Amino acid sequence: MDERIVVLSGSGLSAESGLPTFRDAAGLWRQYSWVELASPEGWRMHPELVLAFYNERRAKAWAAQPNAAHLAIASLERKFEVTVVTQNVDALHERAGSTRVLHVHGELAFARGTGPARRRQRIDAAPIELGQKCEEGTQLRPDIVWFGEETQFMEEARETVAAADRVLVVGTSLSVYPAASLVEFCRQRARKILNSLAMDEVPAGFEFRAGPATAVIPTLTAEWLDNWR
């Protein structure tokens, strides 16, 4: 059986492709609170504002290109069974070639209906307009997990981490919960590496490799591929 690798990625990875983090993106809209931009309450109060915010984020995400770290992570699939669990809402992992990606905070490339069926449809870079409806006749909204909504795929992510032979954490300071709690499910004998620009505290059992992901991750993945047997 192929060795199983789980990659846990966060906003620092996308930032190296030029994408602002949520807080940085919201900063461009600083006259509004996050409640107004990214919550069910904000959506009910002024959906046109929420759509404009996410249409801008989607356009920027689609204009960005996968960086060297995204490509290096995708290259691991040549010899390993790889699952990416990401907090990022862009499609840079998929566009780099990763084939199994769990987006715990949703995806900008999809819209969904606001009815009980929550019907999803792929929109890639296209904007969502007020009055644009899904096939069941309800208004489309971004397929994003907003503040106050339940994170997606967490049970599958926990099981995948618990079964992994190697766990690579990249682009996150492990400060956003519940996604950050996934490191608690690593097997003791799994090889565990965390790459970030800086960390206040490195989880027990993890090797810390400081530096930009675009410098650290290609070197690490080349090492893993070269030593595979």
Image: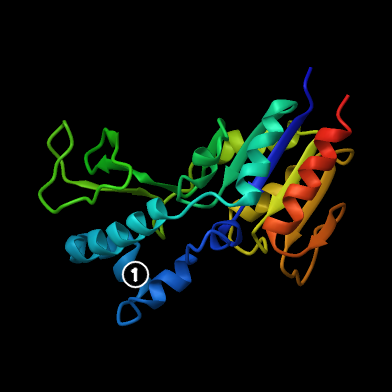
All told, the count of numbered labels is: 1
Give the residue displayed 65% in from the left and 50% down from the top: 69
Q: Residue extending furthest bottom?
A: 31
Residue bearing mark 1: 35
Q: Percent from the top left, x then y, of residue 196?
A: 72, 62
Q: Is residue 169 above or below residue 2?
A: below
Q: Is residue 185 above or below residue 52?
A: above
Q: SS class of the residue under badge 1? A: helix
Give the residue displayed 80% in from the left and 58% down from the top: 203
Q: Is residue 159 visible?
A: no
Among the 4 quarters of the image, the one containing residue 34: bottom left
Give the residue displayed 67% in from the left and 41% down from the top: 73
Q: Percent from the top left, x then y, of residue 103?
A: 50, 43
Q: Percent from the top left, x then y, of residue 83?
A: 64, 34
Q: Percent from the top left, x then y, of residue 133?
A: 14, 41
Give the residue displayed 89% in from the left and 38% down from the top: 189
Q: Is residue 78 above or below residue 154?
A: above
Residue nearest the observer in this picture, 155 or 220: 220
Quarter in which the C terminus is drawn: top right
In this rendering, position of residue 197 left or right of residue 91:
right
Among the 4 quarters of the image, the one containing residue 134: top left
Quarter in which the N terminus is drawn: top right
In this rendering, position of residue 189 left or right of residue 104:
right
Local packing at callout 1 (Cα closer than 10 Å; few below 14, some 14-19, many 20+) is: some
Amino acid tagged 1: Val
- The colour mode here is rainbow
In this rendering, position of residue 181 left or right of residue 44:
right
In this rendering, position of residue 220 left or right of residue 157:
right
Q: Is residue 61 visible?
A: yes
